[in-house]
Image (cartoon, helix red, strand yellow):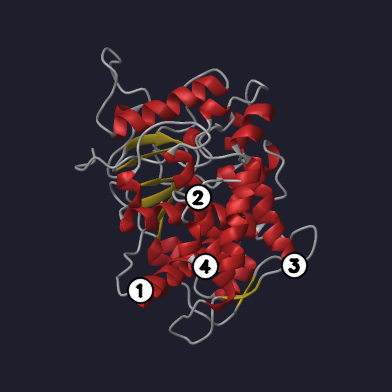
Amino acid sequence: MPPTRHRAFPHPYCSTRSTPSALGQRAALSWARRLDDTGWPVEFNDDVALDTSQVQDTRGSGGGGIGGRVALGGGGVGIIGAILYFVLSQLGGLPAGSGGSPLGLDDVQSGQSVSSADLSQECRTGADANAKEDCALVAVINSIQGYWTDQFARSGSRYQLATTNFFTGGVRTGCGSATSDVGPFYCPADSEVYIDLAFFKELETRFGAQGGTFAEAYVLAHEYGHHVQNLLGTSAKVREGTGPTSDGVRLELQADCYAGVWANHATTVPTSSGQPLIKSITQDDINRALDVAARIGDDYIQKNLGGGRVDESQFSHGSSAQREKWFSTGYQTGNPTSCDTFAARNLG
Ligand SMILES: [Zn+2]
């Protein structure tokens, strides 16, 4: 359990859960990288080295944690319950009489740490990122952290690298155990990002997103936005609660804005080789990021994947329009100081 009382943020994508069929599509993620339907995807510079030490790959590690077990039945409400529970358990404040661990805490295998040897063999350079989807994600993570390392240094502080864990089914984290049901998330207690890559498939199949590498990059950059908030102490200051102007929503929109800031700098992030890792992105890439932002807005999820009725009092991440707006703000300004959602009177 976390030694400190950080609030956890099981991310924007927590309002959904993986269906058995989506989980079954996991294997597809190791396929060769596909080209997008329209235009070329993000292009990486072939010769730039990738740093796979920023990713811990526990996919196919045997036990698979909680496996494909569905933690809670029911629809959206059950999932929201699961999320609240997840947050509460991380705060050490499980409701009285709740008993046990709803997310299968005891079922998760410990010591699942698996070396990233395979990934380090597979993903050596930008050329590999151009050829394989999981290497592209490594490259994106390198780029995101490269940007923040540089940005922190410029403001006289030091960015601490955060590992992203690729897992399947379930995972034990410094914030307790979680299944893929909660979606990608950042755990402030251990400062790591967790993602079952099946989520990206689900974004397309269930949410109807266009997908593509840059859509996935937005999701990762959002989670790293939470890491930045953790390092800056922003996340420790927020109050609990939901609602359209809640601190929780402001924190999420700020993470979207930080994702946009990185996107602005994506093709200019310096590396030790002198060349940036990302060679080019297109307007189509940006559109795909915005498309995801719109499909994981609270109102979109409530309307299309929940009960069909929009209830602002339950907003936790912001509406589709707000998420698009704040990603765009970051993207257009390229400046993290433009992301002060806490000072904004009008969130959009
Ligand atoms: Zn988030």
Q: Which mark is residue 344?
A: 2
Q: Please identify, in this view, whether the residue under mark 3 or under mark 1 is nearer the observer.
A: 1
Residue, x 36% and y 26% (percent of image)?
104
Mark 2 or mark 3: whose residue is earlier in sequence: 3
Which residue does the numbered mark 4 point to in the structure image? Answer: 139
Pointer 4: residues within 10 angstroms few (<14), some, or many (20+)?
Answer: many
Mark 4 or mark 2: whose residue is earlier in sequence: 4
In the image, 237 versus 41, the foreground residue is 237
Furthest-front residue in this view: 345
Furthest-top residue in this view: 97
Pointer 2: residues within 10 angstroms few (<14), some, or many (20+)?
Answer: few
Question: How far, Cα to Cα, is label 4 from label 1?
Answer: 24 Å
Q: Which mark is residue 40?
A: 3
Question: How far, Cα to Cα, is label 4 from label 2?
Answer: 33 Å
Say above or below: 228 vs 106: below
What secondary structure is marked by label 1?
A: loop
What secondary structure is marked by label 4?
A: helix
Residue, x 62% and y 58% (percent of image)?
328
Hey, what amino acid is under mark 4? Ala
Mark 2 or mark 1: whose residue is earlier in sequence: 1
Hey, what amino acid is under mark 2? Ala
Q: Which mark is residue 155?
A: 1
